[in-house]
Amino acid sequence: MALRSKRSQAPKPIFMSKHADDFSEVHCEECGSGESPGELLLCDKCDKGFHLFCLRPILVSVPKGSWFCPSCSKQKVPKSFPLIQTKIIDFFRIQRSTESTQKPSQDIQKKRKRSSSLVMSKKRRKLLPFNPSEDHERRLEQMRSLATALTAAGTEFSNELSYRPSMAPRSANKSALEKGGMQVLSKEDAETLNLCKKMMNGGEWPPLMVVFDPEEGFTVEADRFIKDLTIISEYVGDVDYLKNRENDGGDSMMTLLHAANPSQSLVICPDKRGNVARFINGINNHTQEGKRKQNLKCVRYDVNGECRVLLVANRDISKGERLYYDYNGYEQEYPTQHFV
């Protein structure tokens, strides 16, 4: 599956190959060109060349270890996770009590009523909790789609930031260290975020479907209408120091803390533990067509003194529409010009 651009301030990967001496005779099997030799990847079985950006799904860095082209690897659609309720519940560690699944629904209705009564008196636009599908069977389908993608990626489901012994400790996650300061999540919006987490713990799932596209790899679609400013997901994974990941071609690293002191900067690494956020694709922000695709924004917040990253709808999203955000929202340095 595709590796996505590192969404951090780590240096851009250097594209090398064990066959670098033969680049002068290699051309891309897709476009026929031998240009951009630094981005030509050779199959370890047939020795044919492919530009990283000509592959579908696109690769943004040379994979670690051996790599085989689509023909030699005989790529197939990933095997679907079983549509068995008990297996899905266990995979996502969902609370089984009836009370835990019903109370959030009641809370969300109260919150909507309270928010609507205040909308005229306050100009600040408040974040909204997601609106889960009413059909229990449909929610199981949505959860199965994510379980399929996570299993194919070898990723354990987690809906929280993880702090591992060999990485950055939780004490390092201090929003006060952010260069230039960080936006504070209001008390009401923090309650909305907690409500979303509580609903998911009880099996009330965001209306999202993870699908496999031969052009884009795993990607995420809205499975019902989603309102502007709805919280889609928190970006989670293992938290580590950026300095430890500078030469890491890890999949989908995200900036968590951009500290004034670079040695204190943190990234989120969702390759071992993560959620639906790691499968949401980026726009090609070099074209107007690409920019029009954007329907989410990525925002880093100060939540009780810690840095958190949220993906939030930046306009109304129709059912069936794929979700995209700008990987270059902060650093403006990622190679998105070849994104589909």
Image (cartoon, rainbow, N blue to C red):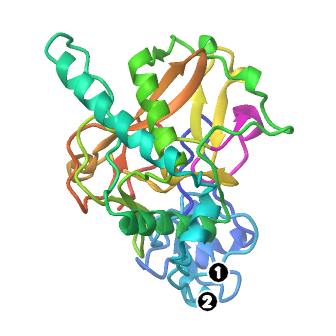
Quarter of the image for the N terminus: give it: bottom right
Would residue 155 be visible to someone looking at this image? yes
Q: Where is residue 275 in the image (x, y as percent from the top left)?
A: 55, 52
Residue drawn at (53%, 55%) of the image: 4
Say if mark 2 contacts mark 1, CB within 8 Å: yes
Gap in angstroms between the C-alphas marked 2 and 1: 6 Å
Residue annotated with mark 2 = 72
Q: Position of residue 127 (x, y in %)?
A: 33, 28
Q: Position of residue 80 (x, y in %)?
A: 52, 79
Q: Is residue 124 above or below residue 287?
A: above
Residue annotated with mark 1 = 68
State the count of labels. Answer: 2
- Stretch in magenta: 237-252
Q: In this view, does 225 lie above or below 310?
A: below
Q: Where is residue 270 in the image (x, y as percent from the top left)?
A: 63, 49
Mark carried by residue 170: none
Q: Is residue 18 above or below residue 271?
A: below
263 displayed left or right of 295: right
Helix, strand or loop for disc 1: loop
- Say few, some or many: other residues with alpha carbon within 10 Å of mark 2 (under 14 / 14 to 19 / 20 or more): few
Residue drawn at (45%, 32%) of the image: 193
198 displayed left or right of 152: left
- Say few, some or many: other residues with alpha carbon within 10 Å of mark 1 (under 14 / 14 to 19 / 20 or more): some
